[in-house]
């Protein structure tokens, strides 16, 4: 019989207070609760890569180092997502400054050979869509990722990005139009 996982019923506020008191287990629980959500946001913004993993770790490091400043004015998930968006934007800026081509990243992307044609086709579709998302201006990309990929409401997206709801709606509409433009040449293949 397998080990039954330990269930933690503490609230985010309790975990934050315990972390402030030096309880590493409480911080580990925060990471466990929000790791997948933060990874989804980062992957939507910058794709799956080593840099994305680094950004994900940095989100929690930044939060831990500044936990004393967390006032609880927003939900913990919203706060962590805001950090993830900001760090993703920083990574996008770093990528734009880089002018060299990484042969290693191509090898890593091609290392996993799909087992069948359906899996290969699905992977190709995901790559095409992710590349199209990465072509979007970051102000449109961040709204698209939060609303459509991460499932945040318009109101939550506005709070995370510090934007008026009308701006979120207009950027989302613009992002969808641009994404359709980018994907139109591939529609027959998708």
Image (spheres, rainbow, N blue to C red):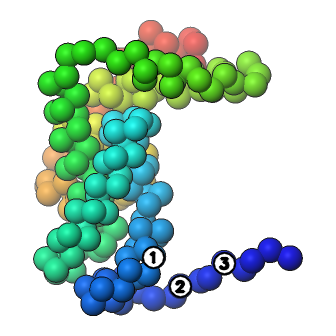
| Residue 9, image x, y percentages | 51, 88
Determine the CA span between mark 2 and mark 3: 10 Å
**Residue shown at the point (28%, 37%) measured from the top left:** 141
Relative image position of residue 169 (x, y in whole percent): 24, 46
**Inter-mark Cα distance, 1 to 3:** 13 Å
Helix, strand or loop at mark 3: loop
Number of the label disc, if any, that sits on residue 29? 1
Give the class, few, some or many, for how many residues have Cα within 10 Å of label 1's Cα (few <14, many ≥20).
some
Numbered disc 1: secondary structure? helix
Quickly name the residue at label 3: 5
Q: Dot 3, crowdedness within 10 Å: few (<14), some or many (≥20)?
A: few
Q: Earlier in the sequence, mark 1 or mark 3?
A: 3
Real-space Cα distance between discs 1 and 2?
8 Å
Q: Which mark is residue 146?
A: none
Residue plotted at (29% across, 23% down): 135
In terms of sequence position, does the residue under pointer 1 or pointer 2 come before the other? 2
Residue 2, quarter of the rendered image: bottom right
The residue sitting at 51% across, 25% down in the picture is 108
Residue highlighted by disc 2: 8
Which residue occupies 16% across, 80% down? 68
Residue 55 shown left or right of residue 127 in the figure = left
In the rendered image of this protein, does residue 143 appear above or below residue 121? below
Residue 172's image quarter? top left
């Amino acid at each position: 019989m397998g080990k039954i996982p330990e269930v933690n019923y503490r609230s985010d506020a309790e975990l934050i207070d315990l972390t402030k008191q030096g309880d590493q287990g409480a911080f580990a629980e925060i990471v466990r609760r929000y790791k997948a959500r933060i990874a989804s946001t980062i992957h939507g913004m910058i794709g799956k890569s080593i840099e994305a993993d680094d950004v994900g770790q940095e989100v929690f490091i930044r939060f831990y180092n500044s936990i004393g400043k967390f006032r609880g004015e927003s939900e913990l998930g919203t706060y962590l997502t805001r950090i993830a968006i900001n760090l993703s934007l920083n990574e996008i800026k770093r990528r734009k400054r880089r002018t060299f081509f990484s042969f290693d990243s191509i090898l890593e992307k091609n290392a996993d050979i799909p087992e069948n044609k359906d899996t290969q086709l699905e992977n190709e579709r995901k790559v095409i869509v992710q590349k199209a998302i990465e072509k979007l201006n970051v102000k449109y990309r961040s709204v698209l990722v939060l609303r459509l990929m991460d499932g945040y409401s318009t109101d939550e997206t506005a709070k995370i990005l510090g934007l008026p709801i009308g701006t979120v709606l207009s950027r989302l509409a613009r992002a969808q139009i641009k994404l359709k433009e980018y994907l139109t040449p591939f529609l027959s293949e998708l």
